[in-house]
């Protein structure tokens, strides 16, 4: 089965629409979303509707949970908290119900592959950005291969065998990985707010039979997404960072 893996949309409608168009061209069978449909961006309602229509599974990210008032807002930075409050107000009861229906738990499993928003060790909050963190996660994850989001960085971690050190590999556009051996922890990058220096929207194509993955980046109308954030009255730096990719 061919799967498109996406994560961290953050209510960025131009980015999501562009990625979905690329996914349609690739001819995938299913779309798996690793969480954070909302937060930061200015178009939560159409993003929720698109994800509900297109995704086989959509995990709950920390921003989704905060908007649904399931985790404490005090754990967020001031700008992230402001976006959560704005999103709650603009979704209204109907939108909140649709978000609650969209997102499941922060962890799941499909085709024997672990799905986590944060990490196998902490599905909601842990940012896996260092090999040492990945090693701890690989030690405890039940699955040989797991997919994570949350850090907004396209990267994979691999341990070939139990005696080997964990390797960390950044995954720019066109990177391919054959995951048929060893233990893996893989992040497809962010659709709506990349933080790896490339402002283009990220997604990953995965063939579950051969366990081959290919990382993709697609340009999208960043100006439109940034202007929507400014018009909504959200913090300016949430718009500025879309151009910078960090």
Image (cartoon, rainbow, N blue to C red):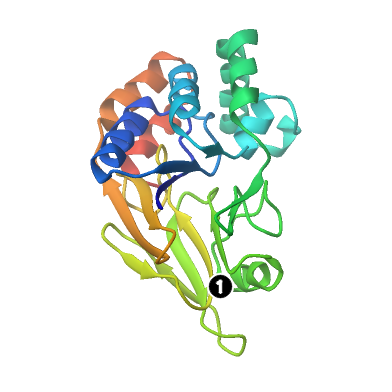
Q: Is residue 45 above or below residue 92?
A: below
Query: Residue placed at 65% from the left, 24% from the top?
Result: 100
Residue 233 vs residue 85, the one in the foreground: 85
Residue 241 vs residue 162, the one in the foreground: 162
- List x then y, in percent, for residue 45: 49, 17
Residue that sits furthest to the bottom in the current view: 163
Query: Residue placed at 32% from the left, 29% from the top?
Result: 17
- List x then y, in percent, for residue 19: 32, 38
Left or right of 223? Residue 180 is right
- List x then y, in percent, for residue 61: 61, 39
Q: Quadrant of residue 54?
A: top left
Residue 106 shows in this picture: yes
Query: Residue placed at 42% from the left, 49% from the top?
Result: 195
Residue 82 vs residue 62, the one in the foreground: 62
Residue 77 shows in this picture: no
Circle 1 — which element? Answer: helix
- List x then y, in percent, for residue 164: 56, 87
**Mark 1 nearby-residue class (10 Å; few <14, some 14–19, many ≥20):** some
Residue 48 vs residue 131, the one in the foreground: 48
Read off the residue under disc 1.
131
Q: Quadrant of residue 80?
A: top right
Left or right of 177? Residue 186 is right
Query: Residue placed at 52% from the left, 78% from the top?
Result: 182
């Amino acid at each position: 089965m061919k799967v498109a893996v996406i994560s961290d949309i953050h209510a960025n409608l131009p980015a999501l629409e562009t990625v979905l168009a690329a996914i349609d061209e690739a001819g995938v069978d299913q779309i798996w979303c690793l969480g954070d449909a909302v937060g930061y961006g200015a178009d939560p309602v159409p993003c929720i509707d698109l994800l509900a229509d297109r995704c086989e599974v959509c995990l709950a990210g920390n921003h989704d949970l905060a908007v649904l008032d399931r985790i404490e807002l005090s754990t967020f930075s001031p700008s992230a908290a402001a976006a959560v409050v704005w999103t709650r107000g603009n979704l209204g009861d109907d939108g909140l119900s649709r978000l609650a229906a969209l997102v499941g738990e922060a962890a799941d499993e499909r085709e024997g592959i672990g799905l986590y928003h944060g990490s196998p060790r902490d599905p909601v909050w842990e940012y896996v950005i260092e090999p040492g963190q990945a090693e701890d996660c690989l030690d405890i994850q039940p699955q040989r291969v797991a997919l994570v989001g949350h850090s907004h960085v396209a990267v994979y971690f691999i341990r070939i065998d139990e005696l080997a050190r964990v390797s960390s590999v950044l995954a720019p556009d066109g990177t391919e990985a054959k995951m048929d051996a060893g233990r893996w922890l893989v992040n497809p990058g962010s659709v709506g707010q990349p933080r790896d220096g490339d402002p283009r929207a990220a997604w990953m194509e995965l063939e579950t039979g051969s366990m081959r993955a290919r990382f993709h980046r697609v340009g999208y109308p960043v100006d439109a997404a940034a202007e929507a954030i400014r018009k909504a009255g959200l913090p300016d730096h949430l718009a500025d960072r879309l151009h910078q990719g960090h």
